[in-house]
Amino acid sequence: MRRSGLRVQPAEVEVSAIRAQGAGGQNVNKVSSAVHLRYNVAASSLPDDVKARLLALPDNRISADGVVVIKAQEHRSLEMNRAEAMARLQAMVDRVAVAPRVRRATKPTHGSKMRRLEGKAVRAQVKAGRGKVRGE
């Protein structure tokens, strides 16, 4: 779901083919079908506020020098892995494209304060009735 018109430019993305890890038989040892995608956020054409929000994400895929590194090896074909890596990068950008709404602090209403105090008084009466019985 694309919420904004921001698109990651393919020219700004460095894609390299690597060999996939894990089980897969002889195909894994012969074919470089996994994709290693690198995207330098600082050198990108994204607006400055989007860059700042992207770099502020608590994500392990973003290195300390501002490079997003995504590895895709789910599919057997290089083209499908490349498309998946680009989709993941676009999803990251889409997530920070729209600025979060600023929360405005409000004060509780007079009625809500009174209801809270009445509830406290009722609860205090219940607890006061649990004390030891004093016989006179």
Image (tube, rainbow, N blue to C red):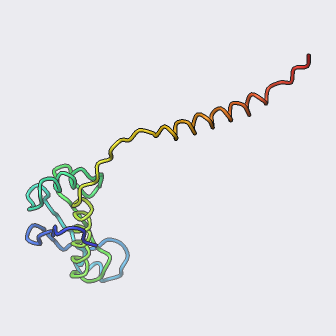
Which residue lies most toward the right here? 136
* Quarter of the view holding residue 92: bottom left
Q: Is residue 128 left or right of residue 81?
A: right
The N terminus lies in quadrant = bottom left
- Where residue 40 appears, x then y in whole percent? 13, 59
The image shows residue 118 at horizontal and vertical percentages of: 62, 35
Query: Which sits in the foreground, 120 or 38?
Result: 120
Seen at 8% across and 71% down, the residue is 11
Q: Quadrant of residue 130?
A: top right
The residue sitting at the front extreme is 111
**Horizontal and vertical percent for residue 62?**
23, 55
Q: In the shown orientation, is residue 112 left or right of residue 29?
A: right
Query: Looking at the image, is 26 positioned above or below residue 93?
Result: below
Question: Where is 17 relative to 68, above or below?
Answer: below
Q: Which quadrant of the rendered structure holds the C terminus?
A: top right
The answer to whether 123 is drawn above or below residue 46 in the figure is above
Q: Nearer the viewer, residue 48 or 108?
A: 108
Residue in the picture at 23% in, 67% down? 89
Residue 38 appears at what percent x and percent y?
17, 64
How many marks on residues?
A: 0
Quarter of image, res 13: bottom left
- Is residue 11 positioned above or below 124 on the image? below
Identify the residue at horizontal 38%, vertical 41% (top origin): 106
Residue at image position (30%, 79%) is: 28
Q: Residue furthest top?
A: 136
